[in-house]
Image: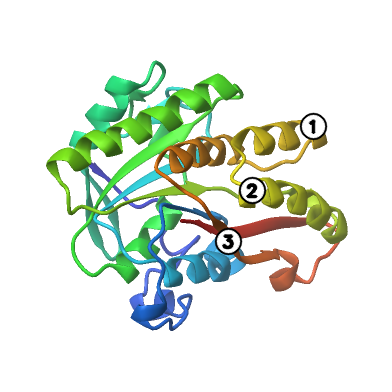
């Protein structure tokens, strides 16, 4: 089973040379061993510089567990792509079916499902960056989330933690990184978007999943990947995360020049 690229040539470059322009030149010794990271998923033209700075600074992993929102409304509420490969113009990436099984086993809500992933862009947008920074072959676990319930986020975050813990018992030298795919405020003025996004980012930097959940709901922040990010923070804290750092924040206005209606993008690492 191969999940073909849907957004190459439109949302991100098909050309390797063009894609590499989004990465910063960071010496290997300055790269950081992260537990997780947060990266936007708009077209690279708008958010690629933010994502590129995040992926440039992290040490590559053997497995990436990707959590993103379900924009299409298709498939299961928590949909884990079960097996096979995802393809981009830069090659095929295998799905780590062993970790898939562990997550589904440890979760009350996660289900194996391909429908939710068929036309969803939030995870595919991340994959070329992972291919650009790779030092060796790696595998992925793609998960989309369509929930508005803290308990379900808690369930998934705990299941991801338990799956990583169990997998590493047999694969001690394998490095696993969790990626949350999210954009921030949508279609507000630059000043208002910055104000709202600052509130959300502060909760992420505090490593407070409950704080982020409550803040986004209380202020009506249109952060599309809040539930993947809450789940990621829960798993990261269980895995021993102590710090978070904002790598870059910008908005679509930095490219379009339209400051009246912007989308915010934040790149964050957790370690």
As displayed, is residue 129 above or below residue 25? above
Q: Assess whether mark 2 and mark 3 are in contact (beta carbons under 8 angstroms).
A: no
Q: Secondary structure at mark 3?
A: strand
* Circle 2 residue: 206
Residue 237 seen in render: yes
Q: Residue at x 86, y 59 (%)?
A: 191
In this picture the colour scheme is rainbow
- 256 relative position to 112: left or right: right
Alpha carbon of mark 1 to alpha carbon of mark 2: how far?
18 Å
Q: Which of pointers 1 and 2 indicates the residue nearer the eye?
A: 2
Picture quadrant where residue 218 is located: top right
Please provide percent x and percent y for residue 239: 39, 42
- 252 relative position to 24: left or right: right
Q: Secondary structure at mark 2?
A: loop
Q: Residues within 10 Å of mark 2 (few under 14, many from 20)?
A: some
Please provide percent x and percent y for residue 128: 37, 63
As displayed, is residue 225 above or below residue 108? below
- Residue 105 is marked as none
As displayed, is residue 97 above or below residue 264? above
- Residue 218 is marked as 1
């Amino acid at each position: 089973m191969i999940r073909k690229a849907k957004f190459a040539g439109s949302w991100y470059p098909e050309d390797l040379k063009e894609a590499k322009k989004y990465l910063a030149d960071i010496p290997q010794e300055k790269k950081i061993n992260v537990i997780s990271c947060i990266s936007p998923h708009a077209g690279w033209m708008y958010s690629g510089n933010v994502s590129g700075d995040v992926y440039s600074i992290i040490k590559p992993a053997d497995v990436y567990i990707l959590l993103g929102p379900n924009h299409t409304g298709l498939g299961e509420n928590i949909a884990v792509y079960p097996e096979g490969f995802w393809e981009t113009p830069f090659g095929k990436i295998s799905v780590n079916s062993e970790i898939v099984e562990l997550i589904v086993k440890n979760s009350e809500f996660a289900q194996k499902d391909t429908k939710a992933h068929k036309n969803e862009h939030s995870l595919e947008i991340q994959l070329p960056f992972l291919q650009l920074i790779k030092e060796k072959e790696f595998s992925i676990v793609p998960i989309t989330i369509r929930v508005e319930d803290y308990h379900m986020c808690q369930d998934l975050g705990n299941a991801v933690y338990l799956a990583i813990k169990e997998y590493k018992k047999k694969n001690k030298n394998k490095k696993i990184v969790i990626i949350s795919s999210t954009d921030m405020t949508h279609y507000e003025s630059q000043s208002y978007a910055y104000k709202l996004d600052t509130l959300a980012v502060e909760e992420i930097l505090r490593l407070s999943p409950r704080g982020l959940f409550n803040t986004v709901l209380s202020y009506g922040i249109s952060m599309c990947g809040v539930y993947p990010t809450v789940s990621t923070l829960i798993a990261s804290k269980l895995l021993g995360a102590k710090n978070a750092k904002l790598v870059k924040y910008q908005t679509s206005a930095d490219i379009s020049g339209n400051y009246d209606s912007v989308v915010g993008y934040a790149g964050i690492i957790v370690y």
